[in-house]
Image: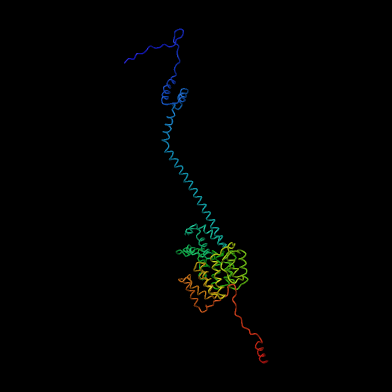
Amino acid sequence: MVTTRGPSVPGPANSNGRPIPGPVPDESRTGSAPRVAAAADQGDSGFDRQLASLFGESLFGPWLDPGQYLGATRTTRRHGTPFRRLALLVLVLGIGTAAGWIVRAGLVRRAGEEREHTAHSLASFLREGELDRVAQFLALLCGPNATLDARDPHLDLIVRGEAALYRYQDADPARLGRIRPYLSPVGTNPPSAPRTLASLTVASRQERAARLAELESIRPALDRDPEFHYLLATALERKGDVKAARQAWERAFELGPLWLAHRYEQTWFEARQGKPESVSKLVGRLMSVAPESAWARLASQQFAGAQAAKPDVSPEGSSARPAPAVALFHQNFALALAQVRAGDPVAGRRSLGQAIAAVNGQAPFVLDAFDWLLEAKAIGLARDLTGFEAWPRHSDLAAARLEQLAEPGNRLAENPPAASEPQAKPGKHVKRPGRGKSKAKARHKR
């Protein structure tokens, strides 16, 4: 098909009739014109068209409309996002794990340091005899569940602390149950010196006397421990060696003057030996260091002129601290002896029952009470004690006590002298001179 052209229109001419050359078209502009028009058709804004007409194409390629640019970047992000997210997640997890390990290691180290400090403080309070603080730091060292771990590096210290609180503070059977598995030898290995000391702490005085050789064997390790010398003194006294017992009591006083329970029992020992000067000195010492303690009040009542140690009933608002269970045991026991001496065996039996109830009927205290009653010649109370429900009937030690009651020397005597008073010696009856002669003279006169 042939297309016919129309007549060409001549361009402008000069005066000579020659055509005037027009401006040579810029190929870059002419080439970009279609693109600008195409971009305009695709929705470019007027501002973008002006930029394209002024500056031509960008250095990085042709100008893109906003929609094309967003689409291109969105495509790029879509392809790169999974890998970036994975790398970021790995990085965050790594940093978090490292930080957690560092924090956890620091907390463990700090907890270990605090536990060591707690154990050191507990050992100091136990050595000084501050049993109230011992109870507080023992709870911190053992934790809220109070369970014992055989691998605990402070197990010996914990066992000793629990034994001391049981024997001198609360007589709690649960304490004894927690430490009992660690008091006996394990296999062929003998227990350590602290555990041996703890086993002797919770024993009766008769048991300590029977294990005197075992007690002497731990002297090198515990020669500067006040509780060791207290246990040695009670064992030697039970053996009948009063001189050696007094030396042990004095050594215990020198090493641990603040052991209030020890000082009370030492005062009682000196009273039984008839040493009023020593009794006064010990009572004064107790009153000077702890005047509001139950042990100081008990010693002042029992050994400083009072007839009987009254049960501990502190009035409300009083600054005096409540008496521990073991102190109540000694109070009611002393009251029972005083009541029997005063001729009231019924009241004495009742006070003795209150003494045994204060220590939860624990066998070491019951057996010690029997020995003291027998020593004080309160045979009736001793017989009554063997009929209490708390009497350890299935114990060899208790059976041996029953045999002692059958001995001829243990006659029934319901009025024993008080521990704070020396036993009266029978005096000779002396006739008054001249009495018979005066009667004879009177008859002669009549």
Q: Is residue 441 above or below residue 420?
A: below
Q: Is residue 19 left or right of residue 115?
A: left
Residue 244, position in %: x, y? Answer: 57, 71
- Number of labels in the image equals 0
Q: Viewer-proximal residue, 206 or 1?
A: 1
Q: In which quarter of the image is the C terminus?
A: bottom right
Q: Residue furthest left?
A: 1
Residue 69, position in %: x, y? Answer: 43, 30
Residue 391, position in %: x, y? Answer: 48, 71
Q: In this view, does 20 lie to the left or right of 295?
A: left
Residue 387, position in %: x, y? Answer: 48, 73
Q: Quadrant of the N terminus?
A: top left
Q: Is residue 79 left or right of residue 221?
A: left
Q: Residue furthest right?
A: 445
Q: Viewer-proximal residue, 28 or 414?
A: 414
Coloring scheme used: rainbow
Q: Which residue lies furthest to the top in this view?
A: 16
Quarter location, residue 278 = bottom right
